[in-house]
Amino acid sequence: MTRKEYNQCVDLHADALFRFILKASRNKTLADDTVQDSYLILWENVSVIAYEKAKAFLFTTAYRKMIDTFRREKRNADFETINTNAYPMTTLTPDLNEILEHALNLLPPIQKTVVLLRDYENYSYKEIAEITSLSETQVKVYIFRARHFMKTFIKTPDLVI
Amino acid sequence: MKINIRNYEAYFTEYLDGQLSLAAQQELQAFLFLHPDLKEMLEGMKMTKLTPPVIRYALKNNLKKEEVHECTDYYAIAWAEKTISSEEIKMLNHHSRKKEIYRDAALYDQLKLVAPDLRYENKKKLYRPQYRFFSSYFYTGIAASLLIFAGISLLFQQSAERDDTLIKTIPPAMQAVAEIPKNKSYQPNLSAMSLSRPRRVPFSETIITEKLSLSAPITVLNLPIATIPQIPYTIPDCESLCPMRSAHPREILLTEEAKVWKSSGNSFLAENVFSGMFQTGRLLAEKIKTNLNGE
């Protein structure tokens, strides 16, 4: 990959990568650092990584750095447990997207990650499996559980839809 | 693998994403018919599809790499070596990695080696005297002169030998013999021939080369034998003695006996101008000499 292609990767994927980490971690500083670190690693391997593989490399690197940060900070130690009281709603009359965003924030990181990669980035199950080091079946199961939780969440009597 | 209660989640996900095949969809419908509670779970799940928000990463431009990022060492070394251009300095001064590059440049500057003051003691042996500049021409000239001298000597020697071999004088082969009477054995007078007496050879020791009738007497014919006191033997043709000459008959050679010009085939002499001139001069000299002797 050339410098020009690297810069094209910045143009094409930096926003998506930042969005993915920001939504997954809800931490702007962490997202900012993770994006910069990911692109730094990409630049260090610019001669090795093909342009077509750069996006997958960036998302894989960013995801792993985020998980490492979580583990180091001992935050979300249990990646599959739902923390219902973690993120309160910001508005009193939220629309569906906001409710889904809120439901998303309550998801365990692994489910949140696969749903974000699937819905935001339109990654295939196979690509998500490669990024998250899961099997395709695991990816599908996590996506279904996440969607089931979100559906259950938006149908709770406390929320007005 | 068929859909069952343990793996339905994966099938549901694919169904919601619209990635199930027709056969799998029919299989799923049959499964949902048997499990109405799961059918209820599946309903309304399509609402949970997230719409990606538009988020711009503000520091995107900082991630981009310029040429400086690609080869920071180049600018650092160029700075240390004082080969950096004014435009490059101007560009670096406005660059975010200016400090880093200048720090590297200072490091490269310290890496410059200082030449130690060493003297080569055998320097005098390396000097070359002036005559050695033309020594090669000098020796080449000597060698060429020697070669020319040797070539000329060889030519003179060859021409002298050829003169010797042109004319040979053969001593008389026979002496005059008196008339031999018929039906008598021949008895040469050896004393008259001033030759040593040969041994008489019995007839039995003689070698008969042809079939002869021994009963018939050998008759001696009274053949006149010419006596030649001295036979000058002249080489009839130079070409028969020197085959090389026939191939190159481009030169002429004057012999004493023939007094005519004959062709010569000495290709070596005819190949170059110098030898040709030399040969011509030599032949002219011989012709003059022969004419003087004839007069």
Image: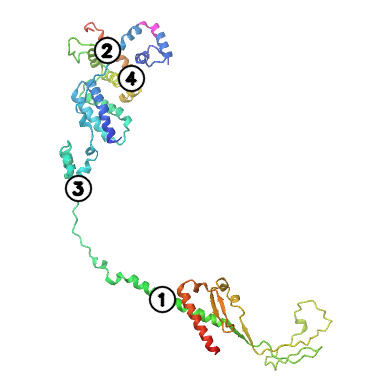
Chain letter for mark 4: A
Mark 2 or 3: in front is 3
In the picture provided, is B80 more to the left or to the right than B5? left
The magenta stretch is B31-36
Q: Which residue is mark 2?
A: A150
Real-space CA distance between mark 4 and mark 1, rounded to the nearest whole angstrom: 99 Å
Around disc 3, counting alpha carbons within 10 Å, would you say few (fewer than 14), some (14 to 19), or many (20 or more)?
few
For this orientation, the residue located farthest to the right is B215
Q: Amino acid at mark 4?
A: Val
Q: Which residue is mark 4?
A: A139
- Label ID, residue B146: 1
- Label ID, residue B83: 3
Q: At which x and y percent is residue B111?
A: 19, 48
Real-space CA distance between mark 2 and mark 1, rounded to the nearest whole angstrom: 112 Å
Magenta stretch prevailing secondary structure: helix
Chain letter for mark 3: B
Q: From what the image shows, is residue B211 above or below residue B21?
A: below
Q: How many marks?
A: 4
Report the quarter where the N terminus of chain B lies. top left
Chain letter for mark 2: A
